[in-house]
């Protein structure tokens, strides 16, 4: 992409309304624009990152055996009356009336709708296990939308819903998602720690929030230092092997980790002091087993092996891709801007022409631009006629992992500079070596 043809509205001034660094940087880097309180447009750079996150989530959901669907954003109030949640949900739900005075709502979540889909088609335990997910916009009329897309009113969510014959199988479905989440966050270049979360009236221990440690996080969290050094399961994990999954979950739930709601001072005090991490955290994902709560209320039953109908055991599993982007920036930035983990970077490389119009610079850049594209390297080429200082500042701000800097003196002798955004390390190399170095 040539910057001169792109739409990258970088802000020079720091927006006053933004209280935390990720919000400031997303606005300054031209990733998002607020359209109303807690409602954002994703601009090209922001959308590229959002798509990268969604694709990683999708690949790992698919790998675990979940199946993608797409449910609408608008739902009928009647469906929510069946579960009893239409009145219970309260003011976070945006209620809408259509021209025929039918009551609708903008979905804050999809348990009711997916249960309706399930009950309409599935009759037998032989069709289980089933896990259906979608990646769709949600609306929650948060009392205090703030921090940009970290806590917005309209936000993207991946929500998956599992259906199983009994508790044991539902537990395995939960483990599948647990492991898929470990892989998903690791692939995004993030350290997300599964922490015990409130199970409410359902009870048991099958509710975990996946938390990214960050000083600006809204939750208070407590965990064992061991988590910081743990390695996520690899690509070879066998999602058909319930014992293997249970083993991984056991490893990842044995050291202490809890959000403030579940925090147990007595157990915590037994952890050696130097091993304790008490910090603030951002909830990027949440998995939850809720048994037959919706299946009983809504008549989602299957015939078991003995022919009798039983309500299915369900769980739901959410990740907020839009919040995850903000969390990634909170976790990785410096005073000059964002430092993207490679997997989330909107472009792989920023190619900077320091002197457009200079024949050597132009020729070197055009050649590198073409070679990178031929190799499938996604490159943002700053071909604009602006000051070198402004170019460097913008490139650092948007945080692409690698910068290739082409100046007139180097270009004349066939050399360019290559800079690693994270470490700041710079190297002068021959133009011939550039593509090999970055691919
Ligand atoms: P919170 O505690 O932050 O209000 P939640 O527990 O209400 O979040 P869930 O219902 O568990 O959220 O939704 C699943 C995921 O959706 C969350 O883990 C989070 O990543 C994302 N999410 C929830 N609310 C928002 C929001 N207002 N803005 C952006 N992402 C959100
Ligand atoms: Mg909430
Ligand atoms: Mg929460
Ligand atoms: Mg939650």
Image (tube, rainbow, N blue to C red):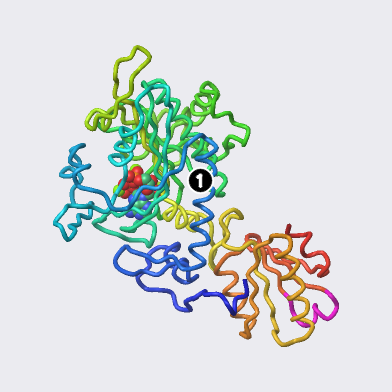
Residue named by callout 1: 58
Q: Is residue 209 above or below residue 216?
A: above
Q: Is residue 159 above or below residue 216?
A: above
Using the image as rendered, state which of residue 79 and residue 398 is in the foreground. Answer: 79
27 inside magenta stretch: no
Q: Residue at x 54, y 63 (%)?
A: 338
Residue 166 in percent (x, y) is at: 36, 21
Residue 439 in percent (x, y) is at: 73, 57
Residue 128 in percent (x, y) is at: 42, 26
Q: Is residue 305 left or right of residue 388?
A: left
Q: Is residue 70 left or right of residue 144?
A: right
Q: Is residue 386 left or right of residue 358?
A: left
Report the residue that reaches farthest toward the top.
306
* Element marked by disc 1: helix
Using the image as rendered, state which of residue 426 and residue 354 is in the foreground. Answer: 354
Q: Residue 218: in sight, yes or no?
A: no
Using the image as rendered, state which of residue 50 and residue 302 is in the foreground. Answer: 302
* Quadrant location of the N terminus in the rendered image: bottom right
Q: Residue at x 39, y 31 (%)?
A: 269
Q: Residue 58: in sight, yes or no?
A: yes
Q: Residue at x 59, y 80 (%)?
A: 4
Q: Which residues are magenta?
A: 406-414
Q: Is residue 20 above or below residue 414?
A: above
């Amino acid at each position: 992409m040539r910057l001169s043809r792109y739409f990258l509205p970088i802000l020079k001034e720091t927006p006053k309304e933004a209280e935390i660094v990720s919000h400031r940087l997303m606005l300054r880097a031209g990733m998002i624009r607020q359209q109303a309180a807690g409602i954002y447009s994703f601009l090209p750079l922001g959308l590229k990152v959002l798509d990268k996150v969604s694709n990683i989530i999708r690949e790992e959901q698919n790998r675990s055996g979940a199946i993608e669907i797409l449910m609408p954003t608008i739902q009928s109030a009647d469906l929510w009356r069946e579960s009893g949640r239409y009145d219970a949900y309260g003011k976070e739900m945006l209620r809408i009336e259509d021209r025929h005075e039918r009551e609708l709502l903008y979905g804050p979540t999809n348990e009711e709708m997916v249960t309706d889909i399930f009950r309409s088609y599935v009759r037998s335990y032989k069709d289980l296990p089933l896990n259906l997910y979608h990646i769709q916009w949600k609306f929650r009329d948060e009392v205090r939308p703030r921090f940009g897309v970290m806590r917005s009113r309209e936000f993207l969510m991946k929500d998956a819903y599992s259906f199983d014959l009994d508790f044991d199988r539902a537990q395995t479905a939960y483990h599948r998602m647990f492991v898929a989440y470990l892989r998903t966050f690791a692939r995004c270049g993030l350290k997300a720690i599964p922490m015990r979360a409130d199970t409410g009236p359902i009870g048991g221990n099958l509710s975990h929030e996946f938390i990214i440690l960050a000083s600006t996080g809204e939750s208070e969290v407590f965990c064992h230092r061991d988590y910081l050094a743990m390695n996520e399961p690899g690509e070879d994990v066998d999602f058909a092997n319930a014992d293997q999954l249970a083993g991984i979950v056991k490893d990842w739930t044995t050291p202490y980790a809890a959000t403030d709601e579940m925090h147990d001072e007595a157990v915590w005090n037994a952890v050696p002091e130097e091993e304790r991490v008490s910090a603030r955290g951002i909830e990027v994902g949440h998995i939850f087993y809720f048994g037959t709560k919706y299946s009983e209320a809504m008549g989602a039953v299957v015939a078991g092996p003995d022919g009798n109908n039983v309500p299915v055991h369900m769980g739901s599993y959410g990740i907020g891709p839009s919040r995850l982007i903000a969390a990634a920036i909170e976790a990785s930035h410096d005073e000059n801007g964002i430092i993207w983990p490679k997997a989330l970077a909107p472009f792989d490389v920023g190619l900077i022409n320091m002197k457009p119009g200079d024949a050597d610079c132009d020729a070197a850049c055009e050649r590198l631009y073409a070679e990178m594209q031929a190799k499938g390297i996604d490159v943002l080429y700053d071909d604009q006629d602006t000051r070198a200082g402004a170019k460097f500042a913008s490139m650092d701000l948007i945080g692409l992992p690698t910068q290739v800097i082409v100046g007139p003196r180097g270009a004349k002798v066939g050399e360019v500079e290559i800079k690693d955004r994270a470490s700041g390390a710079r190297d002068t190399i021959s133009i011939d070596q550039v593509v090999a170095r970055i691919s």
